[in-house]
Amino acid sequence: MAARLTGKTALITGASAGIGRASVLALAAEGANIVITARRAERLQELAAKIVALGGKAEIVIGDVREEATAKACVARAIEVFGALDILVNNTGIGIYKNLADTTLADYEVMFDTNVRSTFLFTRHAVPHMIERKQGTILMISSMAGVYGFAGESVYCGTKFAQVGMAQALDKELRPHGIKVGAICPGGVKTEFALGTGRTEEIVEKSGWLEAEDVAGAVLLACTQSPGARIIEIQMRTMNEALC
């Protein structure tokens, strides 16, 4: 059976670790050409080398996803090297878990810039190309914190609700152009996310949360739907969740 994404090109932000890295490997395994971006060059180089060793193709753009120049460079690289951009996975995210009274303006700004501004920038620069081609898939890696609120996470929840809202609005705006837009909303995931800013390694180790590969499976599902179907939102929780 042919790989389902052969000939397609995917751009994944925050690709150096966690959900981003797992999603890169899942899409590459199905034949997608990959453009990856993050600030940690060594990790991106290791990941690109792994893709190439498995017979795939990967391009690296090192940069800060909060900067418009990074978004422009990534979209341009996909088009110049591979001829098109078919899939955008807005994965970059940061969490700083504090009660509101303890949350600083700097905390607020870095969360909204990283989680929401980056989503806007990459989507904004991918969309014109996708409209021209009358096809594409855009995914926001949001969270269950974008579905309902959690105490001590009000600003983080605000950023994740924003991503879900953007996905819902863009689903209506872009569907007439043949573009699919959806949100993936996992609960806790065993990654380095929020370590030192609300989580510890011990909490993650004992959590029973989802694995990054679980979320990558949902990303792959959303990217391999038949032309006549779309996934608007996927909510994910661990099987270990307490019954109540």
Image (cartoon, grey):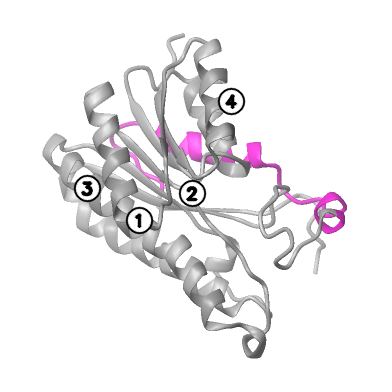
Q: Nearer the viewer, mark 4 or mark 3?
A: 4
Q: Compare marks 1 and 3 and give the one earlier in the sequence.
A: 1
Q: Nearer the viewer, mark 1 or mark 3?
A: 1
Say which residue appears at 42% left-offset and 10% top-offset.
2
Between disc 1 and disc 2, whose residue precedes?
1
Question: Up-down: is 156 above or below 92?
Answer: below
Q: Quadrant of residue 20?
A: top right
Q: Which residue is mark 1?
A: 67
Q: Residue tagged by mark 3?
A: 127
Q: Residues within 10 Å of mark 2 (few under 14, many from 20)?
A: many
Q: Neighbour class for label 4 at 10 Å: few (<14), some, many (≥20)?
A: few
What residue is at 50 percent from the left and 68 percent from the top? Answer: 110
Q: Quadrant of residue 53?
A: top right
Which image quarter holds the C terminus? Answer: bottom right
Dot 1, how many residues are within 10 Å of its Cα: few (below 14), some (14-19), or many (20+)?
some
- Residue 154, x across and y down, in percent: 58, 79
Q: Which mark is residue 46?
A: 4
Q: Between disc 2 and disc 4, whose residue precedes?
A: 4
Q: Which residues are magenta?
A: 202-231
**How far apart are labels 1 and 4 at the CA level?**
24 Å
